[in-house]
Image (tube, helix red, strand yellow):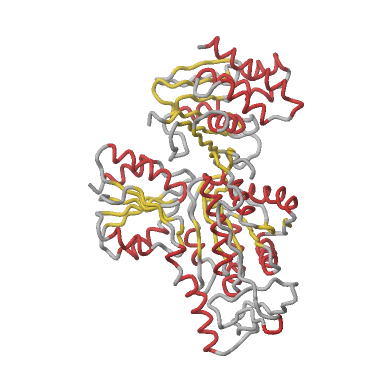
């Protein structure tokens, strides 16, 4: 199963976790030279409730579309962190929002903590781009897709008026992750 | 010719691409999770292609309007999920007897009733076959990847047009909502079939002309006047009490699919040649099965996968053939044993048949299948 690289984005409905997953998959499969499958799971609510998006990236065909042994997981809320961290593999990475996730789960994985939503609010005045900051961080931390591919994927998804904002958010993500590594 | 474009598409979006490629120009339906993206996509795309889209008052209205669209000559589709599929059953029977081409997509969710809208399920396998009353022909296709949803939707339209019958596309929530890279086919890359049109003058036309196994279908409004009823009918479409005509018609609508089943069947076989235990499954569960087969082979277990892309008519020949040379057929399904019953029927005790079921809104994992297969070795 080493030919699968598994990423899980988790948070609450409305935080853009599924969009982050879609963009990561596009970076790998459309703007990169890999195969990718993105899937998701959410409750019946359109806002709130724990939500997760999963991306499997591989050089070959991808059969099972869900995560089995996660290489890298993002948790933007305590609920999602508690509910979904169980599948992180030994030696994997857990990235949490330090203001949201106070109870850090124990496991044989590396935990990185960063105020993702707080940075979006303070540096850019918009918490809505917290998911793009987190996407930049995940790309930088995992190296599974190039930063150029992620940037192309982000810019192809956002309306022209918000290009700059998202570009900045992504750069903040890249830089923040570099400092955490 | 346009350059081929690779896109990351959701299963439901690929369904829209397949339908439009096949020439679908009328959609009527009612939104329901996890199928709604099909309806949203059709509402955006159809008007730009000169097609028509209408959201009806409910699921029954959706399929009824789609039947009207098809009778008027446009390739038509409706899409739904389990609860809506239940509501559409009366009209599915109507389409079978009146021989109206139609594609019905059912993105399966957990049931019964409104069940679990956002979780995957394969609980409509038997509803597709027996949801409407009376003996009737059923063609149902079961894609397993996003690119396959596109190509199987094209095939569904082709079969509906060729056989003048409703064709169902069944897949589950995982496939409906997951995204994979898809290359949109260029025109001409896949065959697109159109229903036979009458070659006789309007006054000589019979909608169920008994000279044919499958009579040509004239579009309403083209000068060919004919009657359509869900009552047993004569070749002119009007009701009949003639027992010979009733019998012939009931047998003929079954026969038109039955004698062509070899061309309707479509199976993928993975490492079956030397297999001792074979997994039989469809849809997203087949992805878990393929993963498990690869892992089992790595540890020296001779496992294989038989994956039907046509679940109805049931792949009797393929199942009968493997049942005579394997120890066991394992049938994982996201229900409590609907396909297993069919496999048992066909295997006739020639090998063990064991179901592996899950109805908690979560997928059957590769490791569940891995461990189930190992029990038989």
Residue sitting nearer the eye, A135 or A123: A135
Residue B143 lies, in percent from the top left, at 49, 51
Residue B146 lies, in percent from the top left, at 53, 45
**Considering the image in quadrants, where does the N terminus of chain B appear?**
top right
Image label count: 0
Residue sitting nearer the eye, A62 or B90: A62
Residue sitting nearer the eye, B136 or B33: B136
Determine the residue located farthest toward the top in the rendered image. A179
Camera sees residue B54 = no
Determine the residue located farthest toward the right in the rendered image. A161
Q: Is residue A33 above or below residue B237?
A: above
Determine the residue located farthest toward the front in the rendered image. B1
Q: Is residue A138 above or below residue B173?
A: above
Residue B87 lies, in percent from the top left, at 61, 63
Residue sitting nearer the eye, B257 or A78: B257
Q: Residue at x 61, y 64 (%)?
A: B194
Q: Is residue B306 above or below residue B6?
A: below
Q: Residue at x 65, y 39 (%)?
A: A46
Q: Residue at x 64, y 59 (%)?
A: B77
User: Would you identify the image quadrant in which residue A2 lies?
Assistant: top left
Determine the residue located farthest toward the left in the rendered image. B377
User: Would you identify the image quadrant in which residue A27 lies?
Assistant: top right
Residue B294 lies, in percent from the top left, at 34, 40
Camera sees residue A166 = yes
Q: Is residue B373 above or below residue A11?
A: below
In-image side of A144 versus B276 (left or right): right
């Amino acid at each position: 199963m080493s030919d699968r690289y598994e990423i899980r984005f988790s948070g609450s409905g409305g935080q853009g976790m599924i969009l982050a997953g879609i963009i990561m998959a596009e970076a790998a499969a459309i703007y990169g030279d890999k195969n990718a499958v993105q899937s998701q799971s959410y409750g019946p609510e359109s806002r709130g409730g724990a939500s997760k998006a999963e991306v499997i990236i591989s050089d070959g065909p991808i059969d099972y579309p869900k995560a089995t042994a996660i290489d890298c997981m993002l948790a933007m809320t305590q609920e999602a962190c508690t509910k979904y961290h169980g599948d992180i593999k030994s030696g994997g990475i857990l990235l949490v929002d330090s203001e949201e996730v106070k109870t850090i789960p124990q496991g044989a994985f590396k935990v990185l903590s960063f105020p993702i939503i707080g940075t979006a609010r303070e540096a850019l005045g918009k918490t809505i781009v917290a998911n793009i900051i987190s996407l930049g961080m995940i790309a930088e931390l995992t190296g599974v897709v190039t930063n150029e591919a992620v940037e192309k994927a982000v810019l192809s998804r956002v309306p022209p008026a918000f290009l700059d904002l998202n570009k900045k958010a992504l750069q903040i993500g890249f830089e923040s992750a570099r400092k955490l590594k | 010719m346009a350059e081929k474009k690779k896109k990351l598409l959701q299963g439901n979006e690929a369904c829209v691409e397949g339908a439009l490629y096949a020439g679908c120009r009328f959609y009527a339906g009612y939104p329901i999770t996890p199928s709604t993206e099909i309806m949203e996509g059709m509402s955006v795309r159809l008007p730009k292609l000169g097609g028509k889209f209408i959201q009806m008052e409910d699921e029954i209205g959706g399929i009824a309007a789609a039947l009207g669209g098809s009778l008027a000559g446009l390739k038509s589709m409706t899409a739904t999920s389990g609860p809506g599929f239940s509501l559409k059953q009366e009209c599915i029977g109507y389409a079978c007897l009146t021989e109206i081409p139609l594609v019905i997509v059912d993105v399966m969710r957990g049931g019964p009733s409104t069940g679990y809208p956002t979780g995957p399920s394969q609980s409509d396998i038997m509803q597709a076959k027996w949801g409407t009353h009376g003996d009737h022909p059923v063609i149902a296709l079961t894609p397993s990847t996003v690119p396959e949803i596109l190509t199987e939707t094209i095939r569904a339209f082709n079969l509906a047009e060729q056989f003048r019958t409703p064709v169902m596309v069944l897949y589950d929530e995982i496939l409906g909502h997951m995204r994979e890279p898809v290359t949109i086919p260029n025109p001409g890359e896949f065959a697109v079939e159109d229903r036979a049109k009458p070659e006789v003058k309007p006054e000589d036309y019979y909608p169920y002309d008994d000279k044919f196994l499958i009579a040509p279908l004239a579009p309403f409004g083209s000068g060919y006047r004919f009657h359509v009823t869900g009552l047993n009918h004569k070749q002119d479409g009007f009701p009949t009490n003639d027992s010979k005509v009733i019998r012939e018609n009931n047998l003929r609508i079954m026969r038109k699919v039955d004698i062509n089943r070899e061309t309707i069947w479509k199976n993928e076989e993975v490492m079956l040649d030397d297999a001792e235990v074979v997994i039989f499954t469809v849809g997203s569960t087949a992805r878990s099965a393929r993963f498990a087969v690869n892992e089992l082979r790595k540890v020296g277990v001779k496992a294989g996968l038989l994956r039907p892309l046509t679940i109805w008519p049931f792949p009797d020949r393929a199942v009968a053939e493997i049942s005579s040379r394997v120890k066991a057929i394992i049938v994982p399904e996201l229900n409590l044993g609907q396909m297993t019953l069919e496999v048992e029927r066909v295997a006739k005790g020639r090998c063990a048949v064991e179901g592996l079921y899950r109805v908690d809104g979560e997928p059957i994992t590769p490791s569940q299948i891995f461990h189930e297969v190992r029990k038989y070795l």
